[in-house]
Image (cartoon, rainbow, N blue to C red):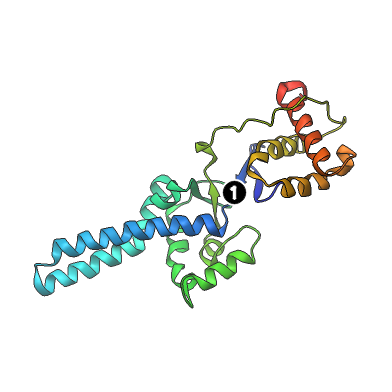
C-alpha cells in the first residue's frame, strides 16, 4: 500500500485498488459545484421573479430541490457531481461498488452536520482524523470518495535499466513496486526517498540509490519477466 491507495478483494478474488481523495481536491470539487448551484439558483430566480408571491414560493422550492438533490442525482447516475467529475473523483461504497440511492441520500443529508460550526468545520476535522478521509456523511453511508482511475491512462515508468528483483516477491509486493514507479513523477524527491527507505531491506541501499533500484526492479517486472 502506498500513500492513500487502498486495496479491496472482491468475492470473486479480484483485487481492486482505490486511491482515496484528500480534503484539498474534494474542496476544489465542492467549489466547482457551488458555482454551478449558484448559477442554477440564479436561473430559477429569474424564471419566477415576475410571479409575485407564488413566484417566491417556487424559487424557494427550486432552491431546496437543487440544494439537496443536485449531488444525489449526479452521484447515482454517474457516480460524481460535475465538480467531482472535473477533478477526476468518484463516490463509491467502501467495497468499491457504485454508490446507491440510499447511500447517496444519507451522505448528502448529513452535509448539514458536516457544515457546522462553519464551512464544513466538523466535516474537515472528521476527514483529518480518518485515514480514509471520510467526513461524517461518508461514515454513516459507508462511502468513499476516490480518484476515478478509469479516466487515467497508465503512467510510464521512469526510464532506467531493468534489474531483476530478489526472488520470492508476492503478487502484492510486485504491484507495490510498480505503483511506486508509476507515481514517482507525482512525488517529491524527499518523499520518494522516504518511501524507498521502507524497502531498504529489499534494495540493500538507501536514499536516491534506493529509489533508482526500485525503478529498475519495476521496469524488470513491467517487461513481463516477473510472471
Q: Residue at x 64, y 63 (%)?
A: 130
33 is higher (above) or lower (below) than 95 = below
Q: Quadrant of the C terminus?
A: top right
Residue 137 in percent (x, y) is at: 51, 64
For label 1, the crowd category at 10 Å Cα-Cα, with few meaning under 14, some 14 to 19 and many 20 or more, is: some
Inspect this view and state whether residue 55 appears. Answer: yes
145 is higher (above) or lower (below) than 165 = below
Q: Quadrant of residue 53?
A: bottom left
The one nearer the camera, 195 or 159, is 159
In the figure, is residue 205 to the left or right of 26? Answer: right
The one nearer the camera, 11 or 90, is 90
Extreme left residue here?
Answer: 51
The one nearer the camera, 12 or 4, is 4
Residue 86 in percent (x, y) is at: 43, 47
Residue 39 in percent (x, y) is at: 27, 58
Q: Which residue is mark 1?
A: 95
The one nearer the camera, 25 or 59, is 25
220 is higher (above) or lower (below) than 26 = above
Q: How many marks?
A: 1
Q: Residue at x 54, y 72 (%)?
A: 122
Tag 1's secondary structure? loop
Q: Quadrant of residue 135?
A: bottom right
In the figure, is residue 182 to the left or right of 107? Answer: right
Q: Residue at x 79, y 44 (%)?
A: 196
Residue 104 in percent (x, y) is at: 45, 57
Inspect this view and state whether residue 170 appears. Answer: no
153 is higher (above) or lower (below) than 22 = above
Amino acid at each position: 500500500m502506498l500513500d492513500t491507495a487502498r486495496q479491496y478483494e472482491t468475492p470473486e478474488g479480484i483485487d481492486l485498488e482505490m486511491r482515496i481523495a484528500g480534503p484539498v481536491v474534494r474542496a476544489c470539487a465542492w467549489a466547482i459545484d457551488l458555482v454551478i448551484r449558484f448559477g442554477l439558483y440564479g436561473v430559477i430566480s429569474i424564471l419566477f421573479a415576475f410571479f409575485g408571491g407564488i413566484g417566491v414560493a417556487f424559487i424557494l422550492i427550486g432552491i431546496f430541490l437543487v440544494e439537496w438533490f443536485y449531488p444525489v442525482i449526479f452521484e447515482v447516475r454517474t457516480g460524481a457531481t460535475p465538480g467531482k467529475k472535473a477533478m477526476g473523483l468518484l463516490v463509491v461504497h467502501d467495497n468499491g461498488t457504485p454508490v446507491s440511492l440510499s447511500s447517496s441520500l444519507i451522505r448528502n443529508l448529513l452535509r448539514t452536520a458536516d457544515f457546522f460550526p462553519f464551512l464544513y468545520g466538523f466535516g474537515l476535522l472528521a476527514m483529518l482524523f480518518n485515514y480514509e478521509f471520510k467526513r461524517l456523511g461518508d461514515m454513516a453511508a459507508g462511502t468513499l470518495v476516490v480518484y476515478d482511475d478509469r479516466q487515467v491512462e497508465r503512467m510510464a515508468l521512469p526510464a532506467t535499466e531493468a534489474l531483476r528483483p530478489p526472488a520470492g516477491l508476492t503478487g502484492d509486493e510486485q504491484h507495490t513496486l510498480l505503483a511506486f514507479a508509476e507515481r514517482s513523477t507525482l512525488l517529491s524527491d524527499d518523499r520518494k526517498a522516504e518511501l524507498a527507505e521502507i524497502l531498504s531491506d529489499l534494495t540493500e541501499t538507501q536514499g536516491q540509490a534506493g529509489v533508482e533500484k526500485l525503478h529498475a526492479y519495476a521496469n524488470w517486472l513491467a517487461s513481463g519477466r516477473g510472471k
